[in-house]
Amino acid sequence: MDWSEKKDKFLKGVGWAVKNTGLYEQALTHTSYAHETGENHCHNERLEFLGDAVLELIISDYLYHNYPHTPEGKLTRLRSDLVCEASLARLAFGLSLGEYIRLGKGEIVGGGFSRPSLLADALEALIGALYLEHGLEQCREYVLELYKPIFHDLQEGVLFRDFKTLLQEFSQARFTVTPFYRIIAESGPDHDKVFEAEVLLAKKSVGRGRGRSKKEAEQAAAKEAWNNLTP
């Protein structure tokens, strides 16, 4: 399957009403590919710039109307969490977006197809393309649909606590391995124990964390591993 067929497969899979396919081709083209082919103007950085602003407006509007009693400071923090690289990368992994981005040879060798920052940028570029083709209201509908799993976590009060899932998606895409967790230490009395967990990839330690439960310690270890592994 050539890239054009892959691109069509992706656009069909997401269910967007796409007519101007050139916009989405640009959104899915990384600068490394454009530079290697001499098409330096046909990459996704400008669309990323636009999509970043559009996404922030859509999320701000969502929070304003769905959290009417939340003060400005907390709304700002929530918005920051919702539009941050980790959030966008999680959505991109869910779309298998890395499979459909045109990358230069060097970026491919370096594992760019699974690099969170690259995936986050590409997703923002796609949002920019949606805005240009459909305008704000239709773009908003597509973005809010895309964000449903993250909004669910927000409502449940677990937003970004599930670093284990995020790390698993990343490690399987980048290294084709599944993280392995183990408890390496316990301290404190039975009623107030503290656990220390370690996470390994291919038997190599990539993160440690502490918590009041084994699950909490594993999440902390996954968060440290995520920060260590993603540029």
Image (tube, rainbow, N blue to C red):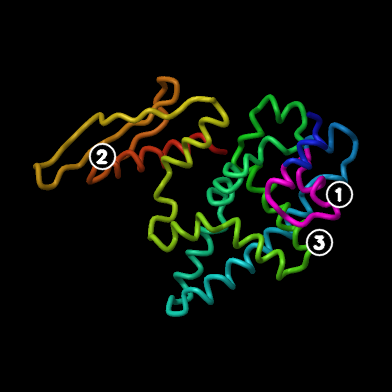
Q: Quadrant of residue 111?
A: top right
Q: Position of residue 64 (x, y in %)?
A: 53, 75
- Of circles 2 and 1, the one toward us is 1
Q: Which mark is residue 148?
A: none
Q: Amino acid at mark 3?
A: Glu
Q: Quadrant of residue 137?
A: bottom right
- Marks 1 and 3, how far apart at CA: 11 Å
Residue annotated with mark 2: 214
Residue annotated with mark 3: 133
Q: Farthest residue in the right direction?
A: 38
Q: Is residue 123 magenta?
A: no
SS at mark 3 in the image:
helix
Residue annotated with mark 1: 22
Do tag 1 and tag 3 residues touch (Cβ < 8 Å)?
A: no
Q: Establish if 203 lies above or below 212.
A: above
Q: Residue at x 58, y 66 (%)?
A: 59
Q: Amino acid at mark 1?
A: Gly
Do tag 2 and tag 1 residues touch (Cβ < 8 Å)?
A: no
Which residues are drawn in magenta? 10-31
